[in-house]
Amino acid sequence: MFIALRDLWRSKLRFSLLAGAVGLLIFLLLFLNTLSATLLGFFIGAIENNSADVLVYEDTARRNLQASRIDPSVVGEVLTVPGVVAAAPIGELTLTATVDTELTDLSLWGVDLTGPGRPDPIVQGRLPGPGEVVVDESATAEGFEIGETITLIPSGTELEIVGYVQDRRYAVVATAYLDFTRWVDVFEQEFPGSPIIPLSLVAVEIASDEEAAVVGDRITAMVAGVEGLDRVSAASGTPGVDSISQSFTLIVGITFGIVVLVVGFFFLILTVQKLRSFVTLRAVGASTGYLAGSLIAQIIILVLLGSVFGTLLLMGATLGSNPAFPLSVDVRLVLTVTVAVLVFSVLSGLLSVRRIARADPAEAAQGTR
Amino acid sequence: MQLAIAEIRRRRGRWASIIGAVAFIVFLVLILAALADGLFIGSTGAFRNSDADAYVYSADGRRSLVRSALPVEDLESVTSVEGVADAGALGILLATAATDGDLFDIAVIGHLPGRVGEPTALTAGRRPATGEQFVGLADMSLRDKGIELGSLVLLTGSAQPVEVVGFVSDARYLLADTLWVTLETWESLRFEIRPETVGGGSVAQAFPIAVSGGAGVEAVTAAIDAALGTTETVTIDEAILSLPGVEQQASTFTAIIVVSFVVVGIVIALFFALITLEKRGQLAILKAIGSSNYLLLRGVLIQALIATVAGYVLGFALSRLLALVLPPAVPVEFLAGTARTLFLATIVMGALGAVLSFRRIIRIDPASALGGEA
């Protein structure tokens, strides 16, 4: 062990360059993961973390909430399906609004405040009454704070913010929730003279002994023109989610491969370069296990240094991130990535260990180069 | 030169691994760049492939085609603003459509045929005539959905299908395949599929405008906003960057690609630092028998060049192989121009990495060749 540290100390530049490269790559891994998690959370948080067990879409909407348009009478039909305890309408409208005199986009959800699909839990403040809304907490970055008033454009309707929910953003814009009947008023003001008030979804609460996916399928089968989905399928089925998560998985996978390759490759070169010294050490009695231990210790130190460096870079990046798209350092993610890189780097280091094990201590006595 | 190449040949394993490392990073960068290009092209075609100089939106539409609404009558006022050579109108309807029972997303875009703002690249068939109802131009991407000239596209919620009379290329909008119909057809479809919009009356969602020669685009956009009072007019470049996600995607991908290139540089630098260290003895001997610094440095540069070029070629091949097996949900697009830029960047970073070991080589004392151990 002692020899491993001495070696590191004697070739500081070389190891710091390598630790720098590993750090940059770990930063890339962390950054990509953080980015994709935040992006997906902003995109479908309102669906993934909905308080309903099953969400019902129009069957031709291709699981796209904004394309889904359901006749209000469907709520009653869904309620007759066995296993359904409660059903409530959800309406969604994406609007332009001003808050604090700034123009911004707003996704406005009309829900049954006590039924399935309700904004729950309220993490701060209270449920909205008439003329009031609760907003997703992430929208505070855009000025949506408790006590502020949202003005809808062009109707001029005013809504006061009285509470926050968490992880309930939709379509990457600020998201607000209010009572469904108030939402209908807003809809009528936005689309004067509209002959219909289409629902976006029907939110369903199921009996405690039922499974969401099963009840969803049952609704699909029994009610004409709709598709019932559990939250997870609804979230992952949203158009675009596939593209985003697959693209990121691909990039993260390749980056991970490169980290491991770079670490394994450099230790192999170092080992080949130091083979004579290793042979000598073995000739004077150092066991393969001892030498392998030193090598692995160096890899671990290097990856840990790289991870610290990568995390620092990530912190820098999150500090500099756009307040409208706040990235934060997830400790669990840092640990997972570090451990994964560590394990695979050590595995790739085994190539070098094999080289050491195969070296014949007798060569040291030959004195040839 | 000969020495540099002979060395690579004699130590194939080691050079294969450095080439492999470079190839992997190049592979990552190429895939990322293809993804960035694919997202950009698929999101912005409807705007990029237009002859408009600027777009007029309603002020409360926040530069969003979907959200903006302008009374069609305002088109006259826009046309009469000095410096406006031509003005068209656009409207968008995001819908689903079916051919043979398979549903897919489609963006129906209403436009004025023959006016500015229509998709420029007609690849087959003809354009709709002014005012012609229920015929349209399909983006080439719709061919994958089985749509051909003469196909009837039925939108969900509509009773009357649209006949495809022509194809345009590279005219997608936010990754959706587009169908370009006359503004009149678009309005009928919109009223039918989204009955709540009837009350809003006849609207367009943007006016693409062409500026007459000699007039400055900035001045004309300002003049339009001043004349109408309720609009926000932006240049075509601003309109493209204002599409949701486009600017963020571009900056994210650029950041990742830059980091990757720094890693390429570090990897090459480390590699040459290591082999230089190892060859100190031989290099001293070479110097002692008369090799100039110049000759040795040139050898290192040539080796770096060979490693990066070979790495690039391998990475390039890998990326094309991957493209063959990628699911269609991943929107990659390989462009020759991007490949060229990245090739140059790889070589430059490789050379920079190699240059870092120059100092080491120059400092080697030829006299040390006599000292036995280097």
Image (cartoon, rainbow, N blue to C red):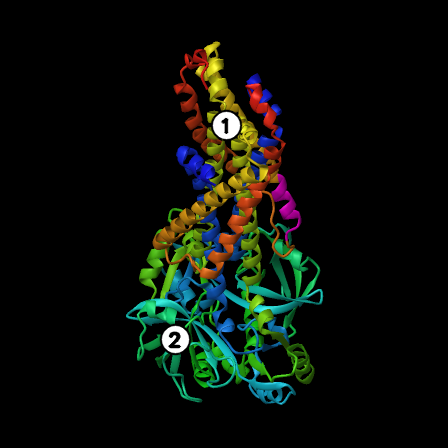
Report if residue A17 is visible in the image. Answer: yes
Residue A86 is labelled as none
Percent coordinates x, y for residue A94 in the rendering: 55, 67
Marks 1 and 2: CB-CB under 8 Å?
no
B114 up-or-down from B105: above or below: below
Quadrant location, the C terminus of chain B: top right
> Label 2 is found on which chain of the structure?
B
Percent coordinates x, y for residue A245 in the rendering: 45, 52
Percent coordinates x, y for residue A250 in the rendering: 44, 48
Q: Quadrant of residue B276?
A: top right
Residue B229 appears left or right of A40: right
> Which circle, 1 or 2, is nearer the viewer?
1
Residue A296 appears left or right of A98: left
> Label 1 is found on which chain of the structure?
A
Residue at 46% in and 16% down: A279
Q: Helix or strand or loop: what does disc 2 sit on?
A: strand
Q: Which residue, as the protein is rendered here, is positioned at the far front?
A: B290
- Quote the CA–CA distance across marks 1 and 2: 59 Å
Q: Quadrant of residue B311?
A: top left
Residue A270 is labelled as 1
Residue B138 is labelled as 2
Q: Amino acid at mark 2?
A: Ala
Q: Which residue, as the protein is rendered here, is positioned at the far left?
A: B100
**Range shown magenta:** A312-321
Residue at 46% in and 52% down: B30
- Residue placed most toward the observer, B260 or A32: B260
Residue B65 appears left or right of A237: right
